Amino acid sequence: MIVDTHAHLDFPHYDKDRDKVIKRSLDLGVKIINVGVNYETSKKAIELSKKEGVFAAVGLHPTNIDTDLVKNKENFSSLEKDFDSKKYEKLIKSSSKVVMLGEMGLDYWRRPKTNKKKEEFKKKQKEILSKQLELANDLELPVNIHCRSAHDDLIGILKKFDLKGIIHCFTGDKEKARKYLEMGFCLGINGIIFKLDLDDVVKETSIEKIVLETDCPYLTPPGVESKRNEPAFIKEVAQKVAEIKGLNLEEVEEKTTENVKKLLKI
């Protein structure tokens, strides 16, 4: 068994063959955690979690926050002005299959041009992230954290909380990794390792602190016969991690699955 800790099968990219994708993954022994990026997709993730071997994460992604300052790159996912803690809490409590709060975090990749608007933009993201972290603390849930071009600010905020979880799609350096690990987080490793040189980070991070993910439909590994990623391709990521760390594939699958079970209690 292996676990894809970060899939988006709740996205419309799978509307035509979602059940087949899920079956293909489960038949290969891949369990799935579908991750919501707003209320709408979080509801869909919970609906999908009714299937055996499928779980859900619920949250508001920073690029799904409507700040009126930047355009959202996706046109299929609605924006939200604020994080309604009570509404999300009710959604989380509607299912025992919700294992994480998030995808939440900070994303400064697309920013307004003026300094004043940049600060307003960052402030809004920090406020909504803090609301989600507070809810996770209240509900005693692990968190799923997105970070792009914002590690210093994110680390500063996370230090105010005593939470565990996953730093999704980690792209920082060894020093940033060390800080997250010291706070008790695991690093989510996915197909980005085929695009960026993260070998040193993977080598120096204990296998006990690594979990695997696809971030499908994005970050498709090279060599597979599909432009669209899916949970079945998690084994390509596992193989790459095994090569970097000098371990066999079975050990990587076993250890990372143990990590997920320990962190998310599934």
Image: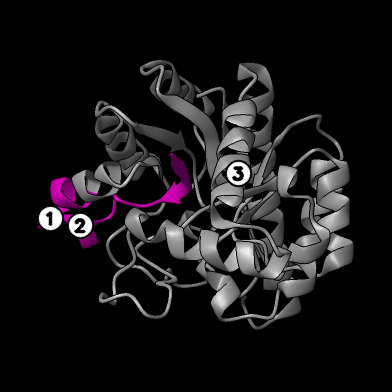
Q: Is residue 60 above or below residue 245?
A: above
Disc 1 packing (10 Å; few <14; some 14–19; many ≥20): few
Tell me the element at label 3: helix
Kindly identify which numbered label has been placed on residue 103.
Answer: none
Q: In this view of the protein, which residue sits in the foreground, 43 or 23? A: 23
Q: Nearer the viewer, residue 19 or 112?
A: 19
Q: Which of pointers 1 and 3 lies earlier in the amino acid sequence? A: 1
Of label 3 and label 2, which has the lower sequence position? 2
Check residue 189 for magenta coloring. Answer: no
Residue visible at 71% across and 73% down in the picture: 198
Indicate left or right for 41 with 178 as reference: left
Q: What is the image's colouring?
A: one colour
**Marks 1 and 2 close (CB-CB < 8 Å):** yes
The numbered disc on residue 14 is 2
Of residue 162 and residue 188, the one placed in the foreground of this image is 188
What amino acid type should be assigned to the residue bearing mark 2? Tyr
Which label lies toward us, 1 or 3? 3
**Percent x, y for residue 109?**
62, 74
- Asked if the stretch drawn in magenta spans residue 12, the answer is yes
Q: CA distance from mark 1 to mark 3?
A: 28 Å
Q: Which residue is mark 1?
A: 17
Q: Residue at x 53, y 64 (%)?
A: 239
The quadrant in which residue 51 appears is top left
For image coordinates 78% across by 65% down, the residue present is: 203
